[in-house]
Image (tube, rainbow, N blue to C red):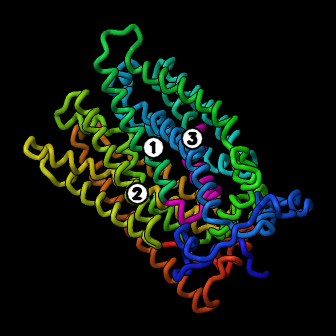
Amino acid sequence: MSSLPTLERQVTDSSEWTTDTDAEKGAVKHIDHAAVDVPQAIAEEDEGPNVGLAAYEQSKALGEITPEQNKRIRVRIDLLLLPLFLITQTLQYLDKTALNYAKVFGMEKAMGMHGNQYSLGAAIFYIGYMVAQPGWQYALGRLHAGKVLGVSAFIWGLTVLVMVWSKNFTHVMVTRFFLGVFEAAVTPGLSLMTGWWYKRDEIPLRQTIWYSAVGWGGMIGSLMAAGISKMDDHPTPRWKLIFYILGAVTMALGICLYFFLADGPSTAKWIKKEDRPAAVNRVAQSGVGLKTTNFNWTHGFQALKDPKTWFLSIAMFGSSVPNGVLTNFSGTIIKGLGYSTFNAALLDCAGRSLQVISLLIAGLVATRWANTRLLMMTIGNLICVLGTAMMSFLPFTHKYTWARLIGFWLVNTQSIGFTIGLVMVSSNIGAYSKRVVTSSCIFVAYCVGNIVGPLTALESEAPRYQTAAYSMMAGYILKTICHGLLWVYMWRDNKSRDKKYGPADPVAAADNGMKGMTENENIHFRYVL
């Protein structure tokens, strides 16, 4: 196939494509899109199962994407899509961790829960999540993604409301299981969808922005708990107020997502019609395609045999064991250091701010400088190892209270490895069927780790939770090793391809990706590191 004028030229590093700044350096001829006679047959071409292929083919007749048009499309997507993603992820985090705050306000006593029953209630959420998330990821590809996510959000908001009518431990277990089932569409789905809208050199910052929701959610939850703790006597138990507020807001979000979240750039009504082909063309440059409505079993099985899948999955398990502790016991651990409920909530809020800041810094660095994604992941992992070492080995005395608290705060940088690990899927795995299976494996590992994590926080060891601290440190060490192996594997593969096939052709890589090739089948594909 001849070189397409719609794609920007390749930079020296064959694994990245140019940014707007690079494009502006060349002489770019502006094409008046309205003046271009696009054959109706192309515009209405049946793209088959490869979503966006017809718009991509149409874009070839429309001339080069100017820097101004590229920026206009990207800003439009940023303004309308990123807030929806951020709010959805924030509410997902708040709703699943509501049990953490309800525990502080006496839910355990109201339910007659004792021993490790709270830990079991926290863990069963991830069993529901693990069972359901492959089906949700398939549905997001097969059906209109916005409507799928909207239905999911509405029902999980209703499930949060149902929690207020729970009477005992059994009710809590059933409700938490179904909460996991319906929340399972969110993080995997948003990660896949980010790759439908953005070029892969834009993805790290955007994904860290919307995933910073876990930090914002933690801060909002802490402030909400602090505010409720200062309320005068109220006829409704304080732990129930948490579920009433969050459930109602989430149901409203579900309605908004159903009607306003588009399925992709080729059908987004809030992108100008003449800009939609160019919006698809931008994403095609990543070489991994958008999505397919038919599942390709051959590509799915390829994912199971790919070392990248297992490096990322084992790393995810390593990070999810401590995440299970952090998510469900943060308030309890800080309170155990000798702080009041109010002060514990504020101190947890301070730690969450570090989570947001570290994510945004990592996203900016990975976006600004090519092939620094795994570097950012490794730095985040090592900070977590240091933090958990402080929690594990510093004496549990008043003298070391602040040092132990700082160690606990440092663990919040775990989100760097988690988030950019998901970016590795959207940026480096070609063919939607393979991405779905890879993502499903990663989130199964995520669920297993989050099930194991709370079980390491033994009530008999409260408030120090020594076993949990050791488990967290071991998980981060495992995660660091796996990310290092992934780094070496992809770097060697890039070198091998350059030697065997010569420099990559970004145009051919984009064509092959839009036709549904995996990264292994696409000889012009190069990994971003």
- Residue 187, magenta (yes or no): yes
In this view, the residue farthest toward the right is 41
Q: Which of the numbered marks, if any, corresponds to residue 107?
A: none
User: Is there any visible trace of residue 526 in the rendered image?
Assistant: yes
Mark 1 lies on a secondary structure that is: helix
Q: Amino acid at mark 2?
A: Ile
**Left or right of 11 in this view: 378:** left
Residue appearing at x 51%, y 77% in the figure: 490
Residue behind mark 2 = 416
Look at the picture and state if 284 lies above or below 400: below
Magenta segment, principal secondary structure? helix
Count up the numbered dots. Answer: 3
Residue behind mark 3 = 84
- The reply to whether callout 3 and callout 1 are in contact (CB within 8 Å) is no
Please provide the residue range marked out in magenta: 181-204
Q: Quadrant of residue 45?
A: bottom right
Marks 2 and 3 sit apart, C-alpha to C-alpha, by 21 Å
Which of the marked residues, 3 or 1, is nearer the chain's N terminus?
3
Q: Amino acid at mark 1?
A: Ala
Residue behind mark 1 = 213
Give the x, y percent position of residue 472: 32, 53
Mark 3 lies on a secondary structure that is: helix
Mark 2 lies on a secondary structure that is: helix
